[in-house]
Image (cartoon, grey):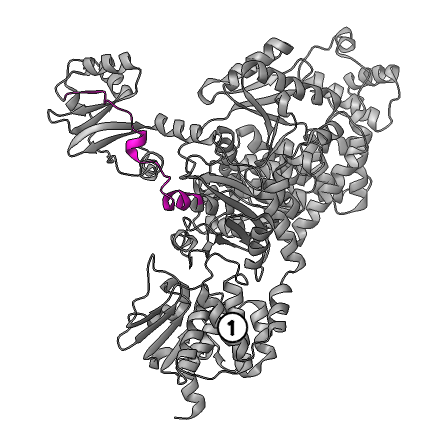
Amino acid sequence: MGDEENRKAPQTVITTHLNADFDAVSSCIAAKLLHPEAEIVLPGSQEREIREFLKEHPDLQRRFLPLRSVDLSRCSRLIIVDTSQPQRIGRLKALLGREGVEVILYDHHPGGGETIEAQKRVLKEVGANATLMTGLLRGRDIDITPEEATILALGIYEDTGSFQFASTTSLDLKEAAWLLEKGADLRAIYRLMSSRFTPSHISLLNDLLDTAERLEIRGIPITIAKTSHPDYVEDFSIVVHEMMDMERIPVLFVLALLGDQVLVVGRSRERAVDCGRILRMLGGGGHSMAASATLKGVTLVEAEERLVKELYRALGAEPKVADIMSTPVLYVLPDATIGDAHDTLTRFGITVLAILDEKGHCIGLISRRTVEKAIYHGLKDLPVSEYMTTDFKTVTPEDTFSRVQEIIIDERQRFVPVEKDGRCVGVITRTDLLQILTEGTRQGAEPLVGERGKSKFVTSLLKERVPDWLYQRLREFGEIGDELGMGVYVVGGFVRDLLLRRENLDVDIVVEGDGIEFAKALKARYGAKVRPHEKFKTAQVIFSDGFRLDVATARLEYYEYPAAMPTVSLSSLKLDLYRRDFTINTLAIKLNSKEFGLLIDFFGGQRDLKDKVIRVLHSLSFVEDPTRVFRAVRFEQRFGFKIGKHTLRLIKNAKRLNIFERLSGKRLFGELKLILDEQDPEWALLRLKELGLLKVIHRDLRLDEVVLERLRAAKGVLSWYELLFLPEKPRHWVLYLLVLMTDLGLVSSRELCARLDFSKKDEALFIDLRKKAIEAVKALEKGDELRPSTVSRLLLPLPLEHQLYALCLSRNEAAKREVSKFITEYKKIRPEVSGDDLKAMGIRPGPIYKRILDAVRDARLDGLVKDKEEELAFVREFIKGKGGVKID
């Protein structure tokens, strides 16, 4: 077997972790010096500086084989450096556990999580793996070149933060000194360590400083910062290093949405915070002072939720069930009657009751609703054991708060018994859970790091962009909130468009309190009308000048919010905003007097406005509400934004899973109507076509060049009509939908109307009247010299949108001219002869009555009569049968 073939099917392979850094790459080189027969195969890409360094040193570069060129079938020994975690070695993980493959491990990370099973382990807790490998080389008297010494020194400098990290040991310094003796180039090391910052890094660093929040968990300050970039950013870890050094942060976790994946990087100078252990729980790895993880298929918000959850778990700050359960347990025995249960439920004002046996074991639950139904049907004397539910989960006092959340949120169980040694010792209800979530939020998180902790106010922008009357009202709404002891916020699209400097007077108010009570206070203050919706604690307020606003209560939607830990800044406002569709719509402005104009941004809405990106808050967003897909497209095209990569993938998944089938016709039509009412719907429709979503509306809808030309014609016609300043206003969506349906047959048209849940009246617009408009166009295009009366008879029975539709469909100039004349001139012409005039002539209402008026109108249009006198003469002649139409 030749050398070339041996190199492609090596028996001994050296590898390291994905996204290899200098420490990992230099450790591979050292491992080859220890095992000369081995070949180095990296599982993935390397950082940019490493690629450039290897390019400058071809002797080192030649020692690496591309993974795609290697046949691993003959591998009998796998040497792994700088990681002990199987998921971090990529495709080479397949060799683990394979019969006949010996595994040798060199690592400086302490154990924890899932670790690789190895026949031989060389482990030492030092600041860098290159330190461990250098010690082995020195111990075996293996001579190394200056190039090898330099890259090993780079590994040590990088992983110890130039000997500044708390994980640095005396051995790191000792081995680095030996490498200097062997010719390590300090100037090259300094150049590489100091010149890694790019303009992208600076932008990301500023973003991280702006978004950083500091939590305190068990007395340890922990900073969490977030950022995003449309593409993967190399050497991101140096941004984290720089931020940590600039702000002297003891513990820092950074989340970066790079492309369609979230990179989580942790750095710690606190021995109590083990970054490696925490990020291993997220599928990553590293050591106690520095670690990272890559999360795919999640949003930035979801990644932060998971990180925070693991922080609380790791630091032992998550409350146990024993800390939060209610006790003593209110219960009845199995033989108690339905009536007894009703008395207990009423006396204590609870909604669910535990049923315990004589030993105190919970054998069932019964709800107030079940009890009241049983009483209504005359069953109050039957035992509760007949109607209790026995299908429920329990917890123990030692279970975690997260377990309770899983049962109440994911499994929809509103009441959870707590059992110990077969006895029910407490209970936790949905209400208990919600109270914990909101009470924990009052501790909050410090907003930002250092000088950037100053809150952002947009008071000046409000004053500049909002009409004076509305600005004054917003001030007054805050004052009313002060009087009622409620937090008052303007939220959503109004705030988004304010920051984009676009006009939007559609105001949505959210109050931390009772939305209906607030609306009633507006009624008392302004004499406004209030339409309350008690079930949802919302109200619409209509002012005497016609201004309307919606008021909502910031409520906890427990079934929609994933496992968020207490003591994080999760106010009821934040939970309310989490329910919204996209990050750009989660912005809020506080209206209370002391903080009027304070901009609230929990989910990076400002950042996404700046980056011009549409992002959902969580991965099930489109599953929960498929209409959001159409909204994403509409906002993308309206603002000139881009749908984020992860959000785009979620849209494609939603299409693949066919979740639109269960979308009601009314809701689908509502979103389609909004798209067609946009200033120029063409681009949104093209995007729907690109994503395969036009077929969701109807399989036969198409958007070829012919249809696009008609859409552009419709846009031009609407612009022309607008400049006429006529009182009658067309419904844009009707015209555009007529255009889209032009080539649909009768069966497809009826199917589409049924899919959109149209009424008979609306169906007639798009079937019967559309057909008449098309026939009118054909008649107009056939005619040579059309009389105005003929044109009017064709177009007058049609709604305005269909008249404009006829103008869009007309292909010759003569027909277009006649339709436009009808709209601008003919349509306005009315006979001066009145019904009273006809009565005076002895003509009673009936079929002939209308025919006479139509005939007079035709004569007026065609110039046969000019005034009322001539019209009356025409009528008299008409009656005698001399008007050109025989009277029956």
Choose top left, top right, bottom left or bottom right for residue 834: top right
Amino acid type assigned to the residue bearing label 1 in the image: Ala
Segment tinted magenta in the rendering: 308-333
Look at the image and tell me whether residue 264 can be seen: yes
Which residue corresponds to the image point at 32% horizontal and 30% vertical from the top-left? Answer: 324
- Which quarter shows the C terminus? top right
- Residue furthest toward the bottom? 2
Look at the image and tell me whether residue 738 can be seen: no
249 vs 757, nearest the viewer: 249
| Residue 735 image point, x, y percent | 66, 37
- Is residue 204 located in the magenta-colored stretch of the structure? no
Which residue corresponds to the image point at 43% horizontal and 36% vertical from the top-left? Answer: 561
| Residue 217 image point, x, y percent | 43, 40
Choose top left, top right, bottom left or bottom right for residue 526: top right
420 vs 403, nearest the viewer: 420
* Residue holding disc 1: 177
| Residue 284 image point, x, y percent | 42, 57
Which residue corresponds to the image point at 60% horizontal and 14% vertical from the top-left? Answer: 522
Choose top left, top right, bottom left or bottom right for residue 82: bottom left
Position of 50 with respect to 781 (left or right) is: left
826 vs 517, nearest the viewer: 517
| Residue 281 image point, x, y percent | 38, 52
Which residue corresponds to the image point at 30% horizontal and 70% vertical from the top-left? Answer: 118
- Which quarter shows the N terminus? bottom left
Tell me the element at label 1. Answer: helix
